[in-house]
Every structure is written in structure tokens, then in C-alpha cells.
Image: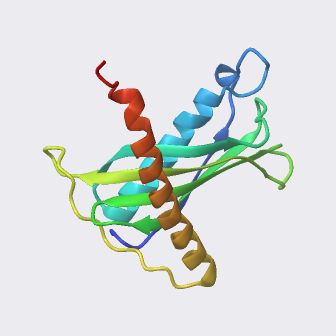
């Protein structure tokens, strides 16, 4: 049911096919897992098909090793009219042990769309705990920063005419 579950965790083993030339899990594989978890969290919250419109602030903190158990957690931290900001934490560790360490963190923005691909409204998420309010406020500050960065980036996508 839409608007009920704001968090989910995908769990799986890092496989040899995920390895890079340095012998660790490839960053591109981690980014794919992030997108999958963000979609699942957004679709679960909204009850709609969702598309990725932004992924940013990706921080690769520690490497993931082949054979590690990987946990990719997506949590709704802000909702707009049609968008959902999803905080993603990737943790990994030896499957024989209970400890998992943070390997990657980022924010992904998903938009719910109808069958024609047009944005459609999502249930509002209202924070209730101090930690949730802190996360929501952080998401709002990041929105303002992205607007300023977007304005600066215009120079790169619209070159001046000389």
C-alpha cells in the first residue's frame, strides 16, 4: 500500500562478475545497485512506476570485496509533489560475521510517472522523529544547492556566442 513503507533493504552476495581491475567490486556495479534500491523504495512509497532524475553526492567510503554480503538500504527522506528523495546506504561485510561497514552513501531523486511518462503525485511523507526532521531538512538544503549548481552548469551546456 502506497505511503506506508518508506525504507527497504536489498541483500545479496557480491559476485566475481562485479569485480574491477583492482580486484574489488566495480563502482559501476555499486551504482546499479543504488539505482535498483532507489527504484524499489520509491515505487514502494508511491505505489507508482518511478524514474531516476538525479543521483548525487556519491561517496565511496570503503571497497566491497567479492563474496561480501551487500546490503543496499533506500529510505524516503523528503517528498515533493511528484518526487521522492531517497537516502541510500550501502553496507558490506563477511557473510560469516554480523558486522557490516558503510561502503557507499548518496541521495537519489525519483519521480513517479503515469503510463504516458508524465509526473504524477506521490503520498506526502511527514517526518516525526528528530532524526527524520534532520534528514528532511538536509534534503531541502541539498535541493537549494543543486539549483545553484545547475545555474553554474548552464555555462557548460549553453556556450556563449562570440
* Residue 126 vs residue 64, the one in the foreground: 126
* Residue 75 vs residue 135, the one in the foreground: 135
What's the residue at 48%, 50% (across, down)? 108
Q: Is residue 89 above or below residue 127?
A: above
Q: Position of residue 119 (x, y in %)?
A: 21, 53
Q: Is residue 33 above or below residue 10?
A: above
Q: Is residue 32 above or below residue 147?
A: above
List the single residue furthest toward the left.
116
Task: Kindly indicate the quadrant of the structure image that contains residue 133.
Answer: bottom right
What's the residue at 79%, 32% (across, down)? 65
> How many labels were placed on the picture?
0
Question: How are the residues colored?
Answer: rainbow
* Residue 42 vs residue 137, the one in the foreground: 137
**Quadrant (top left, top right, bottom left, bottom right) of the N terminus:** bottom left
What's the residue at 36%, 28% (across, down)? 157
What's the residue at 52%, 58% (across, down)? 142
Task: Kindly indicate the quadrant of the structure image that contains residue 41.
Answer: bottom left
**Quadrant (top left, top right, bottom left, bottom right) of the C terminus:** top left
Asked if one can make out residue 162 in the rendered structure from this viewpoint, the answer is yes
Q: Position of residue 10 (x, y in %)?
A: 57, 49
15 to the left or right of 32: right
Q: Position of residue 113 (x, y in %)?
A: 23, 51
Asked if one can make out residue 7 in the rendered structure from this viewpoint, the answer is no
Q: Position of residue 44 (x, y in %)?
A: 39, 60
List the single residue furthest toward the top.
21
49 to the left or right of 92: left
Task: Kindly indicate the quadrant of the structure image that contains residue 116.
Answer: top left
159 to the left or right of 55: left
20 to the left or right of 40: right
Amino acid at each position: 500500500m502506497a505511503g506506508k513503507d518508506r525504507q527497504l533493504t536489498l541483500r545479496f552476495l557480491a559476485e566475481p562478475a562485479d569485480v574491477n581491475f583492482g580486484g574489488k567490486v566495480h563502482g559501476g556495479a555499486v551504482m546499479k545497485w543504488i539505482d535498483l534500491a532507489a527504484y524499489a523504495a520509491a515505487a514502494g512509497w508511491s505505489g507508482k512506476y518511478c524514474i531516476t532524475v538525479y543521483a548525487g553526492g556519491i561517496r565511496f567510503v570503503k571497497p566491497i570485496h567479492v563474496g561480501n554480503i551487500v546490503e543496499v538500504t533506500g529510505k524516503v527522506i523528503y517528498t515533493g509533489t511528484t518526487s521522492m528523495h531517497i537516502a541510500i546506504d550501502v553496507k558490506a561485510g563477511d557473510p560469516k560475521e554480523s558486522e557490516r561497514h558503510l561502503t557507499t552513501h548518496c541521495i537519489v531523486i525519483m519521480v513517479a510517472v503515469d503510463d504516458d511518462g508524465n509526473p504524477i503525485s506521490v503520498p506526502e511523507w511527514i517526518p516525526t522523529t528528530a532524526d527524520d526532521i534532520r534528514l528532511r531538512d538536509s534534503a531541502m538544503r541539498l535541493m537549494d544547492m543543486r539549483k545553484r549548481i545547475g545555474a553554474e552548469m548552464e555555462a557548460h551546456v549553453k556556450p556563449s556566442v562570440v
